[in-house]
Image: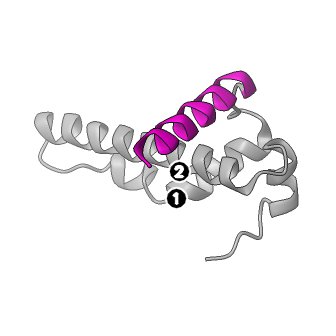
Amino acid sequence: MSITSPEIDSLLEKTEQNPFLLCAIASKRACDINNMLRGQHLRVTAIQEFDDITTVVSGEDSISTAMEEIDSGTLSFVKEDFDEDIKGSNIRVQHNS
């Protein structure tokens, strides 16, 4: 899979030129989208035999949706929270060594 739209440079601008951060934000959002679709599917099938709603909505790749949200600015991150999470991860790694 290659990212052609949105362009990777545009996405990296929004994530401080940090490819790890870009991947972390996009994968977290993609998981949220998949969970939302799964829950929607279960609710629909509980009240009707055929799920014609979720199949239409879920036609787009969740990673692509997340990348588009990052590029448009509707999905972002709080730098201070990210920095704290990274510091906490580093402390746990050092402690386990």
Reply yes or no: does residue 5 show up in magenta. no
Neighbours of disc 1 within 10 Å: few (<14), some (14-19), many (20+)? few
Tell me how many marks there are: 2
Identify the residue position indicated by label 2 in the image. 27
- Main secondary-structure element of the magenta-colored stretch: helix
Residue 31 % position (x, y): 43, 46
Neighbours of disc 2 within 10 Å: few (<14), some (14-19), many (20+)? some
Q: Residue at the bottom extreme?
A: 1
Residue 15 left/right relative to 91? right
Amino acid bearing label 2 = Ser
Q: Residue at x 63, y 26 (%)?
A: 84
Residue 30 % position (x, y): 50, 48
Give whichever of discs 2 and 1 has the lower sequence position.
2
Q: Which residues are magenta?
A: 79-97
Q: Is residue 21 visible?
A: yes
Question: Which residue occupies the foreground of this view, 43 or 5?
Answer: 5
Residue 27 left/right relative to 34? right
Question: Which residue occupies the foreground of this view, 31 or 60?
Answer: 31
Q: Residue at x 55, y 31 (%)?
A: 88
Rendered view: 94 above or below 10: above
What is the C-alpha distance between the residues marked 2 and 1? 15 Å
Identify the residue position indicated by label 1 in the image. 60
| Secondary structure type for disc 1 | loop
